[in-house]
Image (cartoon, rainbow, N blue to C red):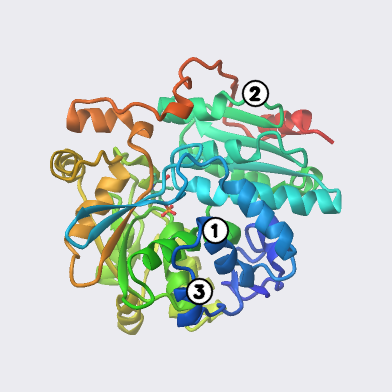
Amino acid sequence: MRYISTRGQAPDLTFEQAMLTGLARDGGLYVPAEVPQMSTADIAALAGLPYEEIAFRVMRPFIGDTFTDEVFADLIAKAYAGFGHDARAPLKQLGPNHFLLELFHGPTLAFKDFAMQLIGQMFQEALSRSGERVTIVGATSGDTGSAAIEAFRGLDAVDVFILYPHGRVSEVQRRQMTTPVEDNVHALAIDGTFDDAQARLKDMFNDFDFRDGVRLAGVNSINWARVLAQVVYYFSSAVALGAPHRAVSFTVPTGNFGDIFAGYIAKRMGLPIDRLVVATNQNDILHRCLTTGGYVTDAVIPSISPSMDIQVSSNFERLLFDAYDRDGAAVAALMDELKTQGGFHVSQGTLDRLAADFASGRASEDETLSTITRARDHMNELLCPHSAIGVKVAEEHLDDAPMITLATAHPAKFPDAVEKATGTRPPLPHRMADLYERSERVTEVPNDLGALEDLIRERIHT
Ligand SMILES: *Cc1c(COP(=O)(O)O)cnc(C)c1O
């Protein structure tokens, strides 16, 4: 299995190389050269299997010879052993033909654990085999950083540095980053915004001396291995509701388009998915693009669903690559227009092709809060604000196919919004009830590239 860049100018890579690299050298994203197919019989055979076994069967064709079957099965088992629910991704019924897929039973209470726990294991295995070490640096508005620190803590082939905007993440998110005691993980509170953190991270990747010197690696949502791990729960949930013998639809609270792109890959593999519904908050560039064809950035307006406060959805580039018949030059031209003019327009033909797979909707701040209240009162379900956006938009798209809405975080991870909507502060799950008592370890850093690079060089293990 080879991986190719969406901009057509970077070398093809194996799964292992694509995973360890993240971003392609031509600025594009890696995608599989062809999407492996699962037959109706293959999909039907998944019914009733444990999540780990479904994960093995769905992901196996993508990884080539990076891991043997035995090793890969073992990595999957370790990745999900720490989840707080035996089903890993359980389904709950919300109403007639509407179901909630709970993706928040991992160690940091958001769906990012599904991918991050697995790539932690895969990085460690690949690196210990080659005797190499890497330095992972990530920028986060909260959930990616906590999931990364949790996944990589204590692994001896990796040092991890997570930059988060000082004073701008929720207390639960911060504590999940600052309380792990292992000395290969480092929470860095930058004196600046999330955009500053992301800009300094980009600067580090563009400083080739530094990049090569510390063997910099990225685990943000453009890493193909993260998308792949998320394909699994589309299969497990669809099969539980009758696939492949009937089609289902999904609604996905969306920011960087990573999670919903995994659903699109599941469909391309042969899973009968009727519609994939993009749900956005007031930062609705994807909803605007799918309804008007204009992908035009706007200022980010902070919301109560901060993990979706995004105006450039990186993984959308992967979908455009398919919509433009895998023409890398066409994608590169669009991305250039985005960079120089702040946006681009897709053709009517492209828009029609996208409409065959995708629908979309948005929720305002008030609609998000009222959905949390209504779900508590009428569905007996406490939703986080991101999941509430999904439920609201899904309700506008209900039809004959069962609708599965992805619940992307646990309500206790965003207690302020939930308390505002319901008057009740959601408690943390048992297994992390002492989070507020653990001591914190954090380094405050200036918004300065040289100072950050010095600190990282000093702290890494060699
Ligand atoms: C990251 C995140 C999202 C958005 O996911 P994308 O893959 O970026 O579309 C939604 N909800 C929560 C809670 C998240 O952490």
Whole-angstrom CA distance, mark 2 to mark 3, is: 43 Å
Disc 1 within 8 angstroms of ligand 1 (CB) = no
Q: Identity of the amino acid at label 3?
A: Val
Q: Which residue is mark 2?
A: 181
On the rendered structure, is 168 left or right of 289? right
Whole-angstrom CA distance, mark 2 to mark 1, is: 27 Å
Q: Residue at x 78, y 50 (%)?
A: 127
Disc nearer the start of the sequence (2/3)? 2
Residue 175 location (% of width, % of height): 50, 25
Q: Quick one: label 1, few (<14), some, or many (20+) residues within 10 Å?
A: many
Quadrant including the C terminus: top right
Residue 417: mark? none
Residue 110 location (% of width, % of height): 44, 42
Residue 229: mark? 1
Asked if the residue under mark 1 is in contact with the one under mark 2, i.e. CB atoms within 8 Å, the reply is no
Q: Identity of the amino acid at label 1?
A: Ala
Q: Which residue is mark 3?
A: 331
Of 439 and 325, nearer the camera is 439
